Amino acid sequence: MTPPPPPAAAIGSRHGTRDLASRLRRGVRDLDAAYTIGTVPAGERLEWSISPHPVVIESEEWRTVEAAVRQRARLLNCLLADFYGKQQTLRHRLLPPELVLTDPFFRRACVGLETERESRATLLRFDLMRTATGRWVFVESFANTPIGAAFAVQNRRLMLQENAEYYAALPDFRRIIDFPVRLLDHLRRLAPGGNEHPNIVVLTAGPHDPAYLEHSFLARKMGLPLAQGGDLLVLEQRVYFKTVAGLLPVDVVYRRVNDRDIDPVVFPSQLLTGIPGLVGSIRAGKVAVANAIGAGVADSRALEAYFPRLLRFYLGERPVLSGPPTYYCGDVDQRAAVSDDTGTYSIEPAQSSCKHLPRWVRGGSERARTRALEAMRRQPHAYVARELPEPGVLGHGRAAAHKLESRLSCFALCEGRKIEIVPGGVLRFLPVKRKDDPPGWQAGDTADIVVLSPRDEPSSRPVERPPERVKPLVLGSRAADNLFWAGRYAERAEGAARILSVIRDVGIEEISRREREAWFPVWQGLLEATGHGGSFKATGPAWFTPTLAWHMTLDASNPSSLLRATGAARYNTLQCRDFFSPETWGVINRLCETLDELASRGARTRSHAARRELAKECVGRVLDGLAAFFGTLDRTMLHDTGWHFFQIGMHLERASMTASSLRHALLEAESAARDNRREDADLTALVRMLSSQDAYRRTYHARTEPLFVAEFFLLNRQAPKSIHACLEAVRDCLGAVSALTGPGEDHPLATVRAALASLDQLDLARIFSQRTDSPRFEGHEDARHQAAVAVARLTAAEPATEPESLAGWIERLITRIDEIGSALHDHYFTHQARMGTPAIAD
């Protein structure tokens, strides 16, 4: 291994190294990334950190590691094929039967399943350690659901982004950025029947999975839909994916969930992450799963004790690199030797994922060793004893200074005898400081591994023939639902923040008491439009108090506050994170972190002045953050079906907010105009709060007359906040979606067209020409009471055809907008409106 030039040489100084580390931490924080490793205690969430010091390996040294990893990958696939096939290793007593049959990851239901499949583990991960003598040894193997590939790719991407000069100064080195594309090629070849254009989905447990970042990253980079268990179902032994266009037959499932939770019919589980009937579909040859169910048995550390004889039996080879001396405690003689040992061997579970079992690593406390020995005597088949060598040091900087244990991760993509080896990264460990904890499990940081290419090696992989037909990404129903609500919540937060910003800019203190009283219906309508109408009762002329400002911005108990609305947008974005670029996710994630910090500061103070300032800052942050979110989304997201559903949610929410704002303000202004109270009929504040003052002036060149305002916000086809313009945008998006799904009698597009037709038939001039017969209120009566009575009178009017009241018409318009959302839910998200839809043709 050749030491690389110090990073300071590339970035200038030691201060520059610290600055690089800071930028890397910021990049990781924007990705909201975390990971777990095999020895992390259950429920532990480790933050992903990147060392600014890459590790460079010469091509000669890597050639040995690569050959050893390829040999191990071939052997593990031979073992898996044998365990679930002829079981020759057990018949010839090459392995103790209990080592395999008692393993918690051995799935008896899969014996005889896919016997013709040569590589049951498409993706394998191997962790190696460089000892103090410079020798490489295998430490762990992962065949169930190997994680870490996405983190290795992101390590390289962030390092190239922040320290490009360092990599430019190096000789040619191996690429890892294209790992997802290589993985996709291997998944495509798993399709039953040799289908050259299979439908593939990535199966995840959801955002609560610690490796969800990797799941969404790989799905996005491979261009595959990210599905959860509820998104898939089995009909007549065929797996189908629930999409907005109906049921899509699935040929390959790339699973990222534990196989014990993948089919609740065969493997009872309390988690709702599986697909009932999946094993039956595999047995019928209708679908392939990578990695195959039951591959986790190859993770067992106990196999290390028998690898030399297994290599001779299957491959006729000697090990290129060995693992640490390992003893299987299920063997009586080996168990006795371990029990009599004074501390040479570490006592660990055979399966690294069995985090509930006690373990003891050399150097740990005597109490922890006694507990591990007792557990080993009770469950000997679940334990191994290993003599871990003294670890060496990989890399420079902090790792060299503190002599941190480091492990090199390598990934193997397997297809029969064709195996691609991809260098992953370096994971470093810090000593544990908590009492009685075994040393070595606490992760430190990760480092990019740079493997230099030999001079005679081609600089790039040969160009493969592209597929004859490219399949567009089919949008799943759950993803469409989350995209729709992400658009709605983001628009709701942005609209509410803009309203509050206008209130702040206008300066309510400059409005007289009488004007404040007359404007109350305007504020009431705007409160209702932003979801605060029923949750907060404002009284008195100076109703916009610091309490209300806090309630509408940073109050965590208010479901309609800016804090909660932005958080809901982030939650729905997270649910379909594979549709959003890292830049888009970083914007919404940073915004939510900032709002959480402001809310935390506000919760610690009772000062109204301090809370007012925090609310003011919140409004500015939301406006800036969501403007960046919408702009980045527009420039980075593919304008496909998913984009259309986001736009539908955004425009439908905008139309709903405009209609709710008009309900109180416009009707009171109409009443004031009829009674010749022209000073009360001015709707300038309403137009400003809906961010439309300039557009209104350019359209009418007049003051804000109620008739003009109604026409502008109801019928104008160019105004962004106009209900007609918003519904036309929804109509156009649904038209694009229906080109894929096909129209129907109950299609939501028909509901939108009906709402537009009612708008086109609206005769505002006739409505505003009506004169009320009600007596006028006396001037000395309370103006706010007058407004309430006027609104109540108009709202209570019967929805007559001749003449029609504006109150009744707006009420019906709001109902129609709500019906559009319900129709979308029934037709696309739950398929309640078309349960008999046939499957999509392959």
Image (cartoon, rainbow, N blue to C red):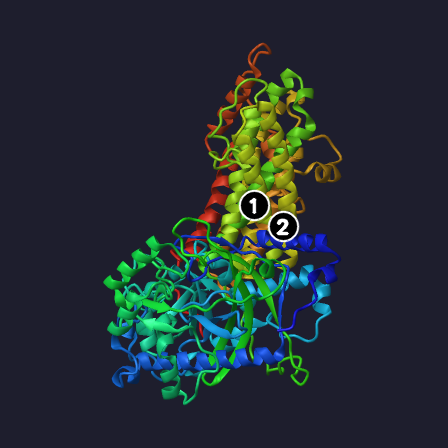
> Which quadrant of the structure image shows residue 119?
bottom left
Residue 383 x, y percent position in the rendering? 31, 66
**In the picture provided, is 496 more to the left or to the right than 126?**
right
* Res 710 visible: no
Residue in the image at 58% along x and 29% along y: 665
- Give the crowd class for mark 1: few <14, some 14-19, many >=20 residues within 10 Å: many
**In the picture provided, is 310 more to the left or to the right than 741?**
left
Residue 332 x, y percent position in the rendering? 24, 72
Residue in the image at 52% along x and 17% along y: 785
Q: Quick one: 779 or 101, which is closer to the camera?
A: 101
What amino acid does circle 1 point to? Ala
Residue in the image at 53% along x and 79% along y: 66
Q: Which residue is mark 2?
A: 630
Residue 416 x, y percent position in the rendering? 45, 84
**In the picture provided, is 484 more to the left or to the right than 629?**
left
> Which quadrant of the structure image shows residue 685?
top right
Question: Which quarter of the rendered picture does the C terminus lie within?
Answer: bottom left
> Which quadrant of the structure image shows residue 303?
bottom left
What amino acid does circle 2 point to? Phe
Question: Which quarter of the rendered picture does the N terminus lie within?
Answer: bottom right
Residue farthest toward the bottom in the current orientation of the protein: 316
Q: Which residue is mark 1?
A: 490
Q: Quick one: 241 or 521, which is closer to the camera?
A: 241
Residue farthest toward the top in the current orientation of the protein: 780
